[in-house]
Structure formats: structure tokens, C-alpha cells
């Protein structure tokens, strides 16, 4: 199906997932305008949200099924497999977050149906970010997402920690947006374009690879995105914000927000700046710093939530390795890793949300002691999540890490691959204690785990995620194919030397 | 039919049985696990007869797994891995039987993990695809980690973490090396494949990178062996692990390191492995392992720790034999691998039995118990003598072959290693004397029960193995000879070719 984005009919088709999501967001707002008093209303809002997300997913699937492609002059929105796969990932993550939230909101007595509206609009912003083929659309999506997530972080009005988290997130996020916007302005100044592929064409034809204005603009863009994905040294906000936010929101931030920002970053770098060599060096150092710092600081954490916060920083570093590989193989590895990481992290946060009561901010790793005897299934699920985050064979996390390593070695980035595996070893130092506490230490008292309640829907989320992790760990073939086509979908410019050098005997032959 | 599926059956059966163990009532778990491990042994036994004493891989099964990455499920055995598989299936039922009274808590998960571990160990020995090998190499880490960490002694958490992290460091660097190797080979051949046969068919042309790749493989395997100075995880893991864990750790897991050298590090990087400087370093480290392991074993008050350090010494012999790379020395190294599994396995069983009787691992807690427990004393004496390498026991044959083969290449090293044999007598005999001879000076020791029928059932097969290999090792040597010869020829030839190319 070829869509000419200059015609409004085709443009509407190309925007179908976003439009469906917008429509359901409006419906949801109408619904909660009347029904916002009881727990039943809350559940209704959640179901409406789920329906909206599912419809948007179906719309993305429809476009993908008809192999929709954009023709004609470049438009505001990209129509490629990378967008569709990223859409599914984001919608799926949002859906799982909604399922986890059902129980959590009632338990924490957060009778705020606008929670779901915000979640929906944040997801809409993410779809725009990953689909935007124009820096302005990307920025609009990013702002829509960010504003909604600022509020989500502080949705628990009775918690000072949440208020602190929200304010911190808002201030630093606003800063980051400023950087991003200034970067866009400078890039526009250098190339007279905001469309991603037009920027790429301008850079190529005018030979702007060394233009200071473009490079400064690119640097500012990297800073802005670096804030959003929590790459070191722009990670300072992440632990406090993750720590203070309600646990399902933390899971959402650590997966969907990060995934959307990363996907947008990857698209911008691949489509606009594939001829600018400078960013590779910058991303190289960002990746190393993020992996090293994230893993080392995570070692020192004693609460599970903060540990997971720093671990998510470390994983941002692994993803940056895939970005630094600057090849379609790297993009494919990136997609696969994001899926594996999101599934794992969501399940881990869902379990953490179940364990914590009221002040779940303070679940120490030692508080999990003896969980295996009292809740064998929960302990098993959390253990699988930890092993997957560690990148242990048999789980999706391993295949993801393997894929990134393949991309890195194929791009002849052996030092980066070595740093990745060495920091992975360090990460054993904080993932394994969770398993050790659950399985190898006696429970402190009979009642230690009495309050742990996952709920039926939360159980579904965890079961689906963990089963997915294990299946993908043994039989990743389908998702690998999907990741590869979506990686190819990102128009890697033909002039990019690294991309052509690796295209001959890469692991695509079959 | 059997030829195609036997190895897959050996891989799949323990996992299925392990899941079954989780479902049966707790009091039946050990019996089910024992029966399952006996079935596993029964499946593997016909390998002995159906294996043709010939070079090349046999019982091969090769199906695509992840075609997009050139990953296949390929299994097969040759004269080198055959005995590792048989050793594994032989030791597992004994370990399960030996755990009957030692493991009293959470029995179902324990026996499940034992069986899963069996799959992992066999997978490492039969894998002929580097991806599959790596997966198996890591997968068997988890069960062992839990076995040490959940059912171990007081410092089990420390020991388990140390065991895990040491192995993990080495194996992850090996992972990068595997990926780089496959990438470089694919650059020359245009085929991206993790198949061992494919990589072996397109060796060379790596240039200086080969040194680093070999280094990564070396580190992974040297930690596992363990070679001096990477051995420090071993005493902790052995001391804290439950008896069955120690037995399998010493009997099988350590062999994965030496097996890795024989199967991967040596044939894949022949020019590096046979580089004089590399050889000198490795031979020197092996000798240090032999002598240092023996000397440290001498001063250990803890019986299990003593055995652990004796493992370092024994594995030093294996490394020496592998690196001398003559037919006798490689065959000897393989034989020492088998012998060490049997003798040290038996020693750990005996240490566990002593511990169950006195709840102490200290040598000084015993003394003069030969009168009280004559059978146990007799078995301990025979096993110790075999570990020292007394003629007519298995220990002698293996070490003698290693020394004989090494002497032709490194006479000085062979002489130092011979001194190591004397050191072995110097740590094991005094320990033996202090445990079972000497005066019976502690009252608690006067009422120790002798070996039960179950314990005899564990030890008698091991004793039979000790004597059989000691007297008539020919059937084993005959089966491993073609593969060993093939390996040596290929390594020497390729090394000469690649060195000439440079």
C-alpha cells in the first residue's frame, strides 16, 4: 500500500494509529467527566483505555499488514516497519502498565481516573515521537509525552516523595526540552530543513559534515535525548524520579518513555546524520560512561526500586552500543533488545508493586528474604526477570545482548563489546543478591510476605511477560525477523560507509 | 535411530525428569530422581559399544535452530567427549544416591536442579555449535549456583557468588571472542555460521587478533579448570557445596575447562596455542598448579579443602599433558580427567560421609577410626592411594602416561611434575593417617557407624572403576586414540602452516 502523504486522505491513513488513540483519549475524557467517583469508575476508565490501546495497535497492524509505505515528497510522518514495531512495543507496554495499575491504584487509594487519560495521551505522544519524520513532530510528541508523564509521576498527591519526583522531573525535563529545541533551531539554521530526510540530503549534498553550527545543533539534540533516555552524564534525575513515582508509573517510565526517546533518537541519527561522523564518537563515550556508571552505582543500592532505576540506566548504555554500531544490524538489535528489556522490566516492576504496601519506596533487597518458600511462583518470576536483565542464556535478555554484541563486533567495535560484557559481569553483583535473598536466606518472620498481593490482572501481566521472556530466549526467530525488517526500514543512507561495509556477510544470510 | 537421537535423549531426559521430580510428593523425590538418573545412565551405556574407535564425530544430529544467525542445534561425540559424557552419566546417579541422607530440606528442587545440571553438563560436552556450546556452558552455571547457595555450608552465599562471578567473567569474554571469530571467518567465507565444523574448515587468516581471541577462550577455560592463579573460587565452592555438589563440581565441571581447551582453544587457534612463549607460560602455570596445589593441600586442616587443592594439582597434570601435545600425554591427560572424576569424586563422597557422622570437616576431629569403621577406612585408603597414583590404581596409569609423553617435549617440566606426584603422597598420606590411624583419642569417634548399604552402593562402583582402569585401561585408550591422534595432527599441521604464512 503506497501512501502519498501530500494527499490528505492518504495522510489520514498513515496517521491512523495516532488518530484512533486520540479519539479514544477524547472518549475517555468524556467518560471520566461523568464517572470519576468510585472504584468501579476507575475500572471502567481502565477498560476504555485498554480498548483504545488495542484499537490503535490494530490500526498499526493494519498498516503493517498492507506493507504501507510513503511515496512522493517526504512528509511529516514516517511510514515504515520501524514505526509499526515501535508502536506495538509502546502500546503493549502501556497496556501492560494499565493492567498492573488496576489493582495498584485501588490498593493505594488513588481514585484518579485521569491517571488513565494521562497514560493514554503520553502514549500518543510516544507514537508521534517514534513516527515523526520531522523534528517538529518529534518535538511535539516529546512534549506531549513529557507533560503527561510529569503529572503521572506526581499523581499520588499525598506523597511528598512523589511531589518531589514530579517537580524534579519537570524542571530537568523542561531543561532538556530547551536543549532539544535549541538543537533543532541550530540544525534548521545549518540545513534550512526540519524534515529528517531533507536534513540528511542537505548534509550530503552541501557537505555539511564539518559545519560547526550543525555539529553544535547535533550535540544539543544528543543532550536533549540523553536526558530523556537517562544516559550518563544526563542521568541525575532518573533515580530520584523513579524512586518517588508510583511503581507502575516507574515501570512505564523505565520502559515506554525510554523506548520512545531511544527510537526517536535512532531515527534522527540514522536518517539525518548518517553522514556526520562526529556523533559516533560522542555516542561511543556516552555508551561507555552509561554502562560503567550505571552498573557501578547500582551495585551500591539497597532498595530494589533504586537498584532497578540504576539498572535501567545501565541498560540505556547497552542500547547506546547498538546505536553506536550505526548499521541496520544495530537498529535491529536495538529493536529486539528494547522488546526484551521492556518485558523484563515491566514484570519486575509489577512484582515490586505487588510486594510494596503504601510505602513501597523502601522495599530493601533483604526484605525479599525467603520469598521463595512463601511465594514460589512470584520468586521464580522475579528470578527469571533478574536473569534476563543479567543477560543469561535461556532468556530473551540474553538473545538481546547477543544481538547487540553481534552488531558491535560486526561494526568492529570490539572494545565496546568488551566493555559491555565486563559491565554485565558487574551487574551480576546486584541482580544475583535479589535471587540470593529470595532463595538462599531464611524469611525473617512468618508474616514477612503476607501482604504481597499481585492480583489477577497483575498475575496475567507477569505470567505473560515471563513466558514471553523464556520463549523468546529459546525460539527468538519470529521476533528476530521482525526486528530485522524494521531495522532495514530505517532508511540507512547509502553513503554511510559503516552501513555498507557490514552489509555483505552479516547474519542475514539464510 | 539410536545413533541419531541418543545424545538428544541424553539432553532432554534429565530436564523432563527434573520437572517430574517437582511434581511428585517430597518424600518420593529422591527415589524418582535416582531412577531417572539410572535411566539416563542406561541410555548412555550403549554408546560404549556402538562407538566406533575412529576419528571424527559420531552420533551426530544437526538441525537448524536460528537460521537468521547461522545457529544450528548440532550435537555429536568423538573419542574425547565420549568419556566425558559417560563419566557424567556415571557420576550423577551416585551423586543422587549419595545425597539421600545429606539433603533434608527442599528435596524436590534439589533433585530437580541436579537433573537439570546433568543436561547442562552433557550439553557442554556434545555441543558442536559455538552458540549452543555457550548457552550450555552458562546454563549449567545456574543449577550449581543454587546447589551451593541453597544447600551449602555457612559461607554458602559468598562461595556461590564467587563461583558464579568467576565463571561469568571468563565466559562473557569468551562470548565476545566467539562472536568476533565467527565474524572474521564470515568475512573470508561469506557464510555467517557458528558451526564448529565450519569454523574448523576455515581456520587461519586471523592475524594478531587470534592472540586476543585465544586469550579470551583461555581465560574462560582456565578459570573453570582452574589453573593457578585463577583457582581461588574452587576451595570456597568445594568446601561450602553439599556432597553431591562437590562431587559433580570436581568430577565433571572442572573437566569442562580442560575439555574446552581440547575441543576449542587448541584446534581453533593452533598457531597461538603452539607459539613457544604461550606454551612456556601455560606449562609453567600448570607446573605451579601441580606443586603449589600440593603444597597448599599439605597444610589444610579441612579435609574438603585438602581435596579441593589436590584437584588444582591433578588438573595441572591434565594441562601439562594437553600442552605437551604428544599422543601419550594427551591420552594420559584424558585419562587423568576420568580418573580425577572417579577418585576425587569418591574422596568427596567419603568426606561427606565423615561429615554426616561427626558434623565436622576438620581432619583433627577424627583419628584412629579404622577400628570403629573398618570398611570406611579401607575404602578411604584405597581411594587415597589411587589419588596419589599408586600402580595398579587408575591414578598411576593416567599420570604415568602424561609424564611419559611430556618427557619427550619438556624433560625439565616432566621432572618437576614427577616431584608433584611425591607431593601428592605427602599431603594425602599424613591426612589419611590422622583420620583413620593414630590413636583413637576422641570418645565421640568410638560410636561412629560404619558404611551403610546405601553408602556402599555409592562407593563400590567407584572402587570398581579405580581398579579396572588401573589394571586394564586398554579399552578406554583404544577408543580415545584415533580422536587424540587426529587432534594432535590437525593442531600441529595447522600451527606449522599458519606460522609459515606469517
Image: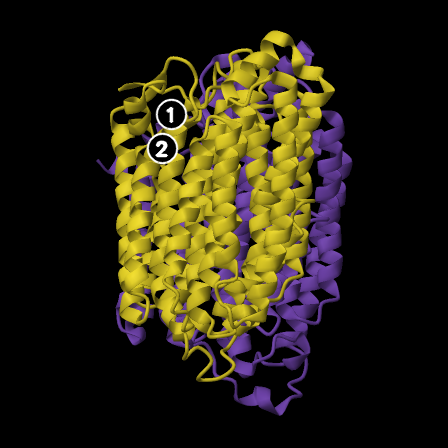
Q: Quadrant of residue B67?
A: top left
The image shows residue A334 at horizontal and vertical percentages of 49, 34
The image shows residue A70 at horizontal and vertical percentages of 36, 19
Q: Which residue matches tag 2?
A: A84
Q: Quadrant of residue A380?
A: bottom left
Along the line of sight, which residue is nearer the eye, A23 or B1? A23
What is the display colour for chain A?
Answer: yellow
Q: Which residue matches tag 1?
A: A80
Residue displayed at 65% across by 21% down: A189
Residue displayed at 44% across by 73% down: B103
| Horizontal arrangement in the rendering, residue A413 relative to residue A393 (left or right) | right
The circle on residue A408 is none
Residue displayed at 73% across by 42% down: B285
Q: How is the image coloured?
A: by chain
Question: Is there CB contact under 8 Å for labels 2 and 1?
Answer: yes
The image shows residue B385 at horizontal and vertical percentages of 60, 60
Along the line of sight, which residue is nearer the eye, B133 or B70? B70
**Which quadrant is the C terminus of chain B positioned in?**
top right
The image shows residue A471 at horizontal and vertical percentages of 34, 45
Along the line of sight, which residue is nearer the eye, A234 or A56? A56
Q: Quadrant of residue B9?
A: top left
Farthest-out residue, left: B1
Residue displayed at 73% across by 21% down: A212
Give the structural element (helix, strand or loop) at label 1: loop
What is the display colour for chain B?
Answer: purple
Q: Read off the chain for label 2.
A: A
* Same chain? Circles 2 and 1: yes
User: Would you place residue B203 above or below residue B482 in this image?
Assistant: above
Mark 2: few/some/many CA within 10 Å (<14, 14-19, 20+): many
Q: Is residue B16 visible?
A: no
Mark 1: few/some/many CA within 10 Å (<14, 14-19, 20+): many
Amino acid at each position: 500500500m503506497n501512501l502519498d502523504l501530500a494527499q490528505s486522505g492518504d495522510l489520514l491513513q498513515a496517521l491512523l494509529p495516532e488518530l484512533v488513540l486520540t479519539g479514544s483519549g477524547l472518549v475517555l475524557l468524556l467518560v471520566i467527566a461523568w464517572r470519576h467517583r468510585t472504584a468501579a469508575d476507575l475500572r471502567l476508565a481502565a477498560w476504555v483505555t485498554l480498548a483504545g490501546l488495542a484499537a490503535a495497535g490494530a490500526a498499526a497492524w493494519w498498516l503493517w499488514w498492507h506493507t504501507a509505505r510513503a511515496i512522493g515528497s517526504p512528509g511529516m510522518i514516517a511510514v515504515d516497519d520501524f514505526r509499526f514495531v515501535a508502536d506495538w512495543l509502546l502500546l503493549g507496554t502501556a497496556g501492560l502498565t494499565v493492567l498492573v495499575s488496576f489493582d495498584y491504584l485501588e490498593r493505594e487509594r488513588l481514585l484518579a481516573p485521569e491517571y488513565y487519560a494521562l497514560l493514554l495521551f503520553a502514549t500518543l505522544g510516544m507514537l508521534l515521537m517514534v513516527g515523526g519524520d520531522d523534528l517538529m513532530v518529534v518535538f511535539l510528541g516529546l512534549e506531549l509525552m513529557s507533560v503527561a508523564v510529569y503529572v503521572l509521576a506526581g499523581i499520588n498527591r499525598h506523597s511528598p516523595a512523589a511531589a518531589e519526583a514530579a517537580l524534579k522531573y519537570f524542571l530537568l525535563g523542561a531543561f532538556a526540552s530547551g536543549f532539544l529545541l535549541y538543537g533543532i533551531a541550530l540544525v534548521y539554521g545549518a540545513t534550512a530543513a526540519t524534515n529528517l530526510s531533507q536534513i540528511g540530503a542537505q548534509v550530503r549534498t552541501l557537505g555539511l559534515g564539518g559545519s560547526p553550527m550543525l555539529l553544535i545543533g547535533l550535540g544539543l539534540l544528543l543532550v536533549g535525548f540523553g536526558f530523556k533516555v537517562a544516559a550518563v552524564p544526563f542521568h541525575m534525575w532518573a533515580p530520584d524520579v523513579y524512586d518517588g513515582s508510583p511503581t507502575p508509573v516507574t515501570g512505564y517510565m523505565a520502559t515506554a518513555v525510554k523506548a520512545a526517546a531511544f527510537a526517536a533518537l535512532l531515527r534522527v541519527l540514522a536518517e539525518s546524520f548518517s553522514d556526520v561522523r562526529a556523533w559516533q564518537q560522542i555516542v561511543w563515550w556516552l555508551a561507555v560512561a552509561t554502562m560503567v556508571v550505571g552498573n557501578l552505582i547500582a551495585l551500591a543500592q539497597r532498595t530494589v526500586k533504586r537498584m532497578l532505576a540504576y539498572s535501567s540506566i545501565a541498560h540505556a548504555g547497552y542500547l547506546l552500543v547498538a546505536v553506536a554500531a550505526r548499521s541496520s544490524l544495530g537498529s535491529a538489535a536495538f529493536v529486539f533488545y528494547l522488546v526484551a528489556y521492556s518485558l523484563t522490566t515491566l514484570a519486575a516492576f509489577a512484582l515490586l508493586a505487588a510486594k510494596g504496601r503504601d510505602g513501597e519506596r523502601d522495599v530493601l533487597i533483604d526484605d525479599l528474604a525467603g520469598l521463595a518458600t512463601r511465594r514460589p511462583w512470584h520468586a521464580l518470576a522475579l528470578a527469571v526477570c533478574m536473569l534476563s536483565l543479567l543477560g543469561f542464556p535461556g532468556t530473551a535478555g540474553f538473545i538481546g545482548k547477543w544481538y547487540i554484541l553481534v552488531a558491535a563486533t560486526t561494526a568492529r567495535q570490539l572494545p565496546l563489546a568488551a566493555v559491555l560484557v565486563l559491565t554485565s559481569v558487574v551487574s551480576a553483583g546486584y541482580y544475583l543478591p535479589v535471587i540470593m535473598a529470595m532463595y538462599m536466606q531464611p524469611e525473617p518472620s512468618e508474616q514477612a510476605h503476607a501482604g504481597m498481593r499481585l492480583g489477577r490482572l497483575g498475575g496475567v501481566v507477569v505470567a505473560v511477560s515471563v513466558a514471553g521472556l523464556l520463549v523468546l530466549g529459546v525460539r527468538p526467530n519470529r521476533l528476530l525477523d521482525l526486528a530485522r525488517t524494521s531495522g532495514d526500514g530505517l532508511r540507512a543512507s547509502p553513503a554511510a560507509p559503516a552501513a555498507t561495509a557490514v552489509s555483505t556477510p552479516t547474519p542475514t544470510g539464510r | 535411530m539410536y545413533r541419531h537421537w541418543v545424545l538428544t535423549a541424553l539432553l532432554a531426559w534429565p530436564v523432563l525428569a527434573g520437572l517430574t521430580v517437582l511434581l511428585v510428593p517430597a518424600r518420593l523425590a529422591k527415589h524418582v530422581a535416582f531412577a531417572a538418573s539410572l535411566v539416563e545412565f542406561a541410555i548412555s551405556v550403549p554408546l560404549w559399544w556402538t562407538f566406533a574407535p575412529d576419528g571424527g564425530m559420531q552420533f551426530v544430529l544437526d538441525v537448524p535452530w536460528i537460521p537468521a544467525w547461522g545457529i544450528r542445534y548440532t550435537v555429536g561425540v568423538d573419542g574425547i567427549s565420549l568419556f566425558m559424557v559417560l563419566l557424567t552419566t556415571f557420576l550423577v546417579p551416585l551423586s543422587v544416591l549419595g545425597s539421600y541422607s545429606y539433603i533434608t530440606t527442599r528435596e524436590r528442587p534439589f533433585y530437580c536442579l541436579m537433573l537439570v545440571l546433568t543436561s547442562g553438563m552433557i550439553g557442554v560436552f556434545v555441543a558442536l555449535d559455538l552458540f549452543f556450546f555457550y548457552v550450555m556452558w552458562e546454563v549449567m552455571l545456574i543449577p550449581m549456583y543454587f546447589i551451593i547457595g541453597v544447600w551449602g555450608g555457612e559461607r554458602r552465599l559468598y562461595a556461590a557468588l564467587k563461583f558464579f562471578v568467576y565463571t561469568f567473567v571468563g565466559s562473557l569474554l569468551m562470548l565476545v571472542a566467539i562472536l568476533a571469530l565467527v565474524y572474521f571467518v564470515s568475512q573470508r567465507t561469506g557464510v555467517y555460521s557458528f558451526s564448529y565444523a565450519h569454523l574448523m574448515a576455515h581456520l587461519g587468516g586471523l592475524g594478531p587478533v587470534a592472540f586476543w581471541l585465544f586469550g579470551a577462550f583461555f581465560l574462560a577455560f582456565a578459570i573453570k579448570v582452574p589453573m593457578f592463579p585463577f583457582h581461588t573460587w574452587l576451595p570456597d565452592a568445594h568446601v561450602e557445596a553439599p556432597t553431591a555438589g562437590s562431587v559433580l563440581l570436581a568430577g565433571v565441571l572442572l573437566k569442562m575447562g580442560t575439555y574446552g581447551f581440547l575441543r576449542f582453544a587448541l584446534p581453533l587457534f593452533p598457531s597461538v596455542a603452539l607459539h613457544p612463549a604461550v606454551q612456556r607460560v601455560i606449562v609453567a602455570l600448570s607446573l605451579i598448579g601441580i606443586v603449589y596445589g600440593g603444597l597448599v593441600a599439605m597444610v589444610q586442616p579441612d579435609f574438603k579443602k585438602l581435596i579441593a587443592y589436590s584437584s588444582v594439582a591433578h588438573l595441572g597434570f591434565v594441562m601439562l599433558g594437553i600442552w605437551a601435545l604428544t599422543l601419550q600425554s594427551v591420552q594420559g591427560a584424558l585419562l587423568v580427567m576420568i580418573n580425577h572424576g572417579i577418585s576425587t569424586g569418591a574422596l568427596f563422597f567419603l568426606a561427606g560421609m565423615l561429615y554426616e557422622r561427626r558434623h565436622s570437616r576438620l581432619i583433627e576431629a577424627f583419628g584412629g577410626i579404622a577400628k570403629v569403621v573398618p570398611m570406611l577406612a579401607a575404602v578411604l585408603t584405597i581411594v587415597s592411594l589411587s589419588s596419589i597414583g599408586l600402580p595398579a590404581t587408575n591414578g598411576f596409569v593416567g599420570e604415568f602416561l602424561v609424564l611419559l609423553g611430556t618427557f619427550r617435549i619438556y624433560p625439565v617440566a616432566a621432572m618437576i611434575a614427577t616431584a608433584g606426584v611425591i607431593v601428592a603422597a605427602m599431603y594425602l598420606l599424613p591426612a589419611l593417617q590422622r583420620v583413620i590411624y593414630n590413636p583413637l583419642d576422641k570418645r565421640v569417634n568410638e560410636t561412629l557407624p560404619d558404611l551403610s548399604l546405601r553408602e556402599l552402593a555409592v562407593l563400590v562402583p567407584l572402587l570398581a572403576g579405580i581398579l579396572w582402569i588401573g589394571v586394564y585401561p586398554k579399552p578406554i585408550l583404544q577408543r580415545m586414540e584415533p580422536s587424540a591422534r587426529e587432534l594432535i595432527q590437525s593442531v600441529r599441521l595447522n600451527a606449522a602452516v599458519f606460522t609459515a604464512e606469517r
